[in-house]
Amino acid sequence: MPYEAMMAETVNMHGHQEDLIDSYLARPMGPGPHPGVVIIHHMPGWDEATKEIARKFAYHGYVAISPNLHYREGKGTPEENSASVRAAGGMPDDRTMGDVKGAIAYLRTLPYLNGKVGIIGYCSGGRQVYLAACTLPGVDAAVDCYGGGVIARPEELNQRQPVAPIEYTKDLRCPLLGLFGREDQRPSPDDVAKTEEELKKWGKKYEFHMYDNAGHAFFSVDRPNYRQEAALDGWKQVFRWFEKYLW
């Protein structure tokens, strides 16, 4: 039986405007080279479930980093940080993109990286994945897990999130996988269909999967939203996608 080991730790990295922020890094102990994955956490925050996802990627041979996008809130728990972000009108897109860009750059400094970096995000992180895939250099593949707000009504836009990510579709720089629940309302199946229309219009490489009997956050093992069948197939699709474009 082959030897298996991984390392997981909190590291400091330079995010938006060179701010030092916490990130969770998980990697196999082998010499590599390994593909990289940036995990954009959900709105509930940089929590235990997010770190578990990072370790899952490490188990499958990836070096994964999850930046704490709520770090600047400075509260005691992920829940308190999340509440603070919601009260302020959501995550500022420029700051989030700065942090994701910093995480990509951090992975690219590692001697055991194979040169490829993918991004994956859940909930608000799915929206941020779409935005990053369209606006940041250095992304080789992207996975949007039920990202709400890719399409937004004018009244949903604000100073922190001034442009709906769908507006940047023409600039999408990498293959995009989307995983959605048919019972979700943000994004709704109609939103997903409109996003697909836009991707087709610009001739982008993408693949969408819509799961029956699943709503928002169906990957979340620690929440009532978890749907085993959708989550198990969803993970299969994620690893198939990344194996195709990151190895």
Image: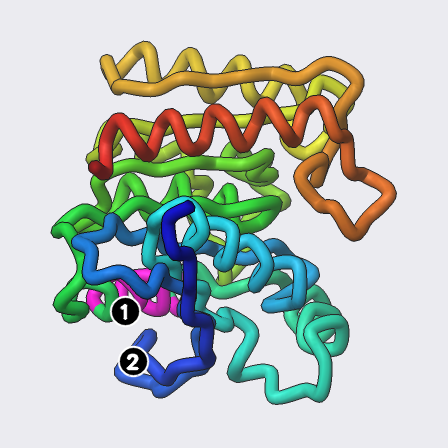
Image quarter where the C terminus lies is top left
Q: Which mark is residue 243?
A: none
Amino acid under disc 2: His
Residue situated furthest right in the rendering: 224
Which residues are the magenta region? 95-105
Instruction: Tell me: residue 3, above or below residue 71.
Output: above
Toward the viewer: 95 or 39? 39
Position in image of residue 79 (x %, y %): 75, 71
Q: Is residue 91 left or right of residue 214?
A: left
Is 208 rendered above or below residue 130? above
The disc, 1 or 2, on the residue closer to the chain's N-terminal end is 2
- Picture mark count: 2
* Residue pictured at 81% horizontal, 48% vertical: 223
Q: Tell me the residue at 46%/21% (across/down).
A: 195
Helix, strand or loop at disc 1? Answer: helix
Residue where numbered disc 2 is placed: 14
For residue 102, the mark is: 1
Residue 114 drawn at (x, y percent): 15, 51
Queried whether the magenta region covers residue 192, the answer comes back as no
Location of residue 108 (image quadrant): bottom left
